[in-house]
Image: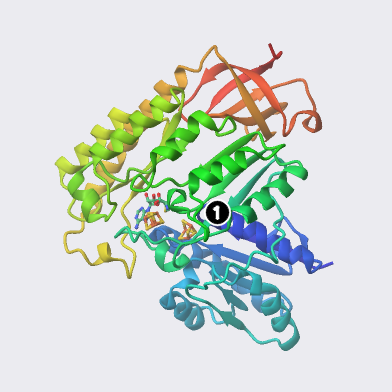
Amino acid sequence: MNKYHIITYGCQMNEHDSENIAGLLEAMGYVYEEDPYDSDVVVINTCSVRENADKRFFGVLGQFKKKRRNDPDFILCVCGCMPQQPRIVEKINKQFSWVDIVFGTQNIAKFPELLEKRIRTGRRQREIIDNNPVIDEQEMKPKRMFRHKALVNITYGCNNFCTYCIVPYTRGREKSRMLQDIVREISCLAADGVREVMLLGQNVDSYRDAVGHDFADLLHAVNDIDGIIRIRFMTSHPKDISDRMIDCFRTCDKLCHNIHLPVQAGSDRVLKRMNRHYDTARYLEIVDKLRAAAPDITMSTDIIVGFPGETEEDFEATLDIARKVRYDSAFTFIYSPREGTPAARFTDQIPDEVCHDRFDRLVDVMNSISLEKNLEYKGRTYEVLVEGVSKTEDNAYAGRTDGFKLVNFTSDKTPDEIIGTLVNVQITESKTFSLEGVEVERN
Ligand code: SAH
Ligand code: SF4
Ligand code: F3S
């Protein structure tokens, strides 16, 4: 039996692509193997969003050199966002020429053919496509990571060209799937036992299919699918979020009261140079509207510190907006210049030590707000969708509240009984990044 392993970096797009790649491999008769060094085929699905992602990838690649040399039947494949950049493919061909197969983000369906060719001819395969106008999803039968929740693409690519970001170059122009194709896929998932869907796009708010359905139309259509009990989505872009979409928090009962709304920076001058197309006043107006529509809504964000030209005053404006919004959680990043993006050519790059100092100060502020918010949960009871056994404790499970809070809790039930169901959990302990509790009877 041939065995495969997939190493995945990056965002949920990549995670879902890896599910699709796993599905393709299993259709070819491969079986999943936990240990990459005991596998016949290893796929490394790469991310390039920051420089440390690049570095990590080349490190991992180096680790396979010996296995590749000692085992002529072993096949190493590289895909994802890194090979969408010609300089990376050149580097692989020069320094890691023993890599067997390289493909990109836009021709995943081609992978079985490339693998079959490599096996038949023994020759290395490279095939990258830029801006594939075709969405090749018919062939895909993703092998899901979770039984009860699923990732579903609604758009591919990105047209926004934020000046720091590599994604528009690695994922191509934005394409929206047809509403009825998405609904059909989710109906099948529901029939297969999926309870929660996460709708994926780099900017879900710019979803528009060929017959004019927008994101609010899509949310209503998904809300009508029997069997689905929770709907999430990411990522929202403040420049495109509409009042109709915000209203869905009132009208779509399955829509979880949680939103990831990247602000990136709290200074209007910096936002402009980032090409984000909103200012802080507009952002705060959206936050107010969301909280009016769903008073218990939880919010998370992405923030970049040390963007070129960021002054101490600009940075303090970022701390300021964070304190105003009071995010439940935040992903904070030090700006990383990406070759080929406009901001990498800006001449006013910020010294490392200034970036690190600001990063540490930001993380302190964000974490203390997260903890304060989580402390409000203590003693209360929440509905939790159980995802699996807890990583931290025996006899315990992990799940999420409607607002996406991670809850580790104890229960007398067996994994088979409880996973994928909704249970009531009383919160006994609040931490910065999670809550703890015990299952209690439904009332
Ligand atoms: N489409 C999503 C985000 C995709 S990338 C959106 O627009 O929000 C995820 C996050 O990585 C971004 O929100 C941003 O905060 C961060 N990021 C992207 N490029 C970066 C870079 N060059 N340096 C540091 N952080 C970056
Ligand atoms: Fe990158 Fe901006 Fe597109 Fe998000 S919206 S993927 S940050 S270019
Ligand atoms: Fe990384 Fe590509 Fe996602 S660069 S963040 S894997 S779109």
Q: Is residue 334 visible?
A: yes
Give SS at disc 1. Answer: loop
Tell me the quarter of the picture where residue 281 sits: top left
Q: Relative to 54, is 405 above or below?
A: above
Please give left or right for residue 381 compared with residue 300 in the image: right
- Residue 307 on image: x %, y %: 25, 53
Q: Residue furthest front?
A: 211
Q: Which residue is mark 1?
A: 154
Please give left or right for residue 422 compared with residue 335 in the image: right
Q: Residue at x 20, y 37 (%)?
A: 316
Tell me the quarter of the picture where residue 442 sits: top right
Depth check, front residue: 422 or 204: 204
Depth check, front residue: 114 or 182: 182
> What residue type is disc 1 on?
Ile
- Residue 253 on image: x %, y %: 58, 29
- Residue 55 on image: x %, y %: 44, 63
Is the N terminus in the top left, top right, bottom left or bottom right quadrant? bottom right
